[in-house]
Each structure stands twice: as structure tokens, then as C-alpha cells.
């Protein structure tokens, strides 16, 4: 009996020592970094008084916090590249349809037109809008809470990092305001840095010219809210791959759809090749848009040198994420 107790005690000590060493490694040699304490503070959940009435809010988020959420959030924020690599390369291919639906509901993106992305980047005041079900049509993670939006952090795209021959540059993702910025800078200083709004706009424009789309990302364990602006390419983005390859609804439409001006269209096929969602096709001398597949990202519009494509509002799709309207 004494031997068993001794073994159990030894195993417990070894396990505790291993977890403590991992924690110190995660905190980069500190017992607790200031940004970890800030991120751990309970968040108030109230609707901002300035949220315009024309922005209808839905029911409360279906996400119920549990004791594992802080651990999940810490691992995601501290080791984002490794987290996404495992998700893209190992978990997603092995998930069944129900599991993919759960992941999409808890971790999803909202496609932004170039104009809407620029408006978000140049925001100069706080926003606190909750349960935006009409804009972010998921049962959870649909709040837009932006504190100190002038505070922008640029960090490495985990999707590009996860690919053997990922697109360059890799530092194209951004967080806007809030404790996430300080957490990234404290815990990943080698791959995160502060940038100005002007620098952020330059990155948006450069990515747009490369034929990449803009998107806002939400995650349940990151406060059920928007936490990042990403610039996504169809060859690397895990969200796009989950949609086009596995049928998971990981991204919501911008609220717009591509419209073809047949009088200007030469049926050259450039837009068909550029579309991240395979929504365009050439058929009997015309270019056709599959409205169900089209996410309204504007990549085809930017790649068409004949100005034959424009984005138009599609009322059957979720409302656009327009921070100007959320601001009131």
C-alpha cells in the first residue's frame, strides 16, 4: 500500500512540475505576464446604449462558458500557429458533418468588401454591439466589441504558416483594440508588432491587389466576439478550405453578390480562376455567377480589367458588417 501511495505521489509531482514548466514557457519565463491577467478579467456583457435601433439584435448567444474555456483561449492565443496547423491538417479532414457544424458555429468568419474592411481599420471610436444575428448568422460568437480601435497589432497568418508552401507575406492578420493586442505582443513578440492605421490600410490594399479577400473572425472562447481581421487566400485559408472542400459553413457572406455586365465581359476566365469560392463559371460564351456560392468578397471585381463585374446588395444574404451603422 505504501508503495502505491509513493508512486501516485511521485506521478502527481512529475505532472505538476511538467504543467508548471509548460506554464512558465507559455509566459516566456514570467510567473504571469500583465496581459494574461488583463485577458483573464471577467468581461461585462451588456448592450451598448448607442447601438442603433435599425441594427436588430438576436437572442443571447448559445455559448455557455465552462471551466475549459480559459485554457482553450490561452492555448489558441499563445500557440495560434500550432492550433491552426492541427485543426487544418489533422482535425478537419477527420471530422464528421456534425462536428464540422459545431466548429463553424463556434469559430467563423464574416466576409468583408474592401470598403467595409477599410472602414473597420480606420475606426476612431469604441463599439459595443451584441448578438448581431442578422449580420453574423451563427448561434454564438457574434458580438462586435472594439475598444481603443486605433490600437492595431499585425501578426502572422496561422493558415499560411500551416502550409508547406504558404503564400507570402505571412504577416497579414490584424487585431483591433482590446486585450488581445497586448496578449499577442507579450506572448508572441517575434511574430506580432503594433502598426498604424495607415500601415494597416496599405496591407489591405496590397492583399486586395494580390487577389485576396478580407474577413472578420469571431470565436466563442475569445469573448464570443470579433477578434481579428484576416486577409485570406484560397490556397491557404483554412476557413475557405473548410467551405469548398468539406462543406462546412465557416464563413458568412458580406451581404453582397457579384453581378456581371455582359456588355463588357470578354469571357476571359480570369474571374473564374480568381474566385475563392468557385462561384463563377463560363458557359456557352457567358460568365455565370452562382449566387448561393458567392460570398461577395469582391476579388473577382478587383481582378477584372474590363470593369465587367460589380458587387450589388443581396437582400437574401446576411446584412453587411458596417461599423458606421453599428456606431450609430
Image: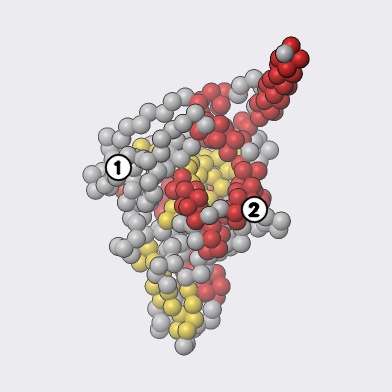
Residue at 32% from the left image edge and 32% from the top image edge: 46
Residue 34 higher or lower than 124, as above or below:
above
| Crowding near the residue tagged with mark 2, few <14, some 14–19, many ≥20 C-alpha atoms within 10 Å | few
Q: Residues within 10 Å of mark 1 (few under 14, many from 20)?
A: few
Relative image position of residue 39 (x, y in whole percent): 51, 28
The image's colouring method is: secondary structure
Is 244 in front, or is 50?
244
Q: Say which residue label 2 marks.
A: 89
Q: Quadrant of residue 58?
A: top left
Judge from the rendering whether residue 2 lies leftward or rightward of residue 303; answer left or right. Answer: right
- Quadrant of the image for the N terminus? top right
Label 1 sits on a secondary structure element that is loop
Pick the quarter of the image with the C terminus. top left
Q: Is residue 127 left or right of residue 194?
A: left
Measuring 55% from the left and 69% from the top, which residue is drawn there? Answer: 274
Label of residue 59 in the image: 1
> Under tag 2, what secondary structure?
helix
Q: Is residue 74 left or right of residue 123?
A: right
Given residues 247 and 183, the one toward you in this image is 247
Residue sitting at 51 percent across and 69 percent down? Answer: 278
Residue 90's x, y, as percent? 64, 51
- Residue 184 seen in this snapshot: no
Kindly give the residue lying farthest to the right in the view shown.
3
Compare marks 1 and 2 and give the one earlier in the sequence: 1
Residue 120 lies left or right of residue 233; in this view the side is left
Q: In the displayed structure, would residue 214 be above or below residue 82?
A: below
Amino acid at each position: 500500500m505504501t508503495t502505491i501511495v509513493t508512486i501516485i505521489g511521485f506521478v502527481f509531482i512529475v505532472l505538476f512540475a511538467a504543467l508548471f514548466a509548460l506554464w512558465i514557457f507559455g509566459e516566456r519565463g514570467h510567473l504571469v505576464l500583465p496581459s494574461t491577467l488583463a485577458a483573464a478579467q471577467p468581461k461585462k456583457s451588456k448592450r451598448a446604449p448607442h447601438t442603433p435601433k435599425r441594427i436588430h439584435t438576436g437572442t443571447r448567444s448559445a455559448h455557455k462558458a465552462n471551466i475549459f474555456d480559459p485554457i482553450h483561449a490561452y492555448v489558441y492565443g499563445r500557440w495560434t500557429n500550432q492550433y491552426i496547423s492541427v485543426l487544418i491538417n489533422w482535425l478537419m479532414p477527420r471530422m464528421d458533418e456534425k462536428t464540422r457544424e459545431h466548429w463553424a458555429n463556434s469559430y467563423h468568419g464574416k466576409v468583408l468588401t474592401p470598403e467595409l474592411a477599410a472602414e473597420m481599420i480606420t475606426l476612431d471610436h469604441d463599439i459595443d454591439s451584441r448578438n448581431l444575428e442578422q449580420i453574423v448568422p451563427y448561434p454564438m460568437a457574434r458580438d462586435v466589441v472594439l475598444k481603443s480601435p486605433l490600437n492595431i497589432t499585425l501578426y502572422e497568418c496561422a493558415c499560411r504558416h500551416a502550409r508547406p508552401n504558404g503564400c507570402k507575406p505571412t504577416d497579414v492578420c490584424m487585431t483591433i483594440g482590446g486585450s488581445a493586442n497586448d496578449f499577442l505582443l507579450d506572448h508572441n513578440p517575434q511574430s506580432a508588432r503594433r502598426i498604424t492605421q495607415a500601415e494597416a490600410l496599405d496591407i489591405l490594399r496590397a492583399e486586395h491587389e494580390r487577389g485576396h479577400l478580407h474577413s472578420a473572425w469571431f470565436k466563442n472562447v475569445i469573448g464570443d466576439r470579433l477578434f481579428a481581421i484576416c486577409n485570406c487566400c484560397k490556397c491557404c485559408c483554412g476557413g475557405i478550405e473548410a467551405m469548398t472542400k468539406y462543406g462546412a459553413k465557416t464563413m458568412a457572406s458580406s451581404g453582397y453578390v457579384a453581378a456581371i455586365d455582359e456588355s463588357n465581359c470578354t469571357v476571359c476566365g480570369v474571374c473564374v480562376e480568381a474566385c475563392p469560392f468557385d462561384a463563377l463559371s463560363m458557359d456557352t460564351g457567358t460568365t455565370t455567377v452562382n449566387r448561393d456560392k458567392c460570398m461577395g468578397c469582391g476579388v473577382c471585381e478587383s481582378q477584372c480589367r474590363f470593369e465587367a463585374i460589380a458587387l450589388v446588395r443581396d437582400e437574401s444574404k446576411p446584412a453587411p458588417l458596417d461599423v458606421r451603422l453599428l456606431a450609430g
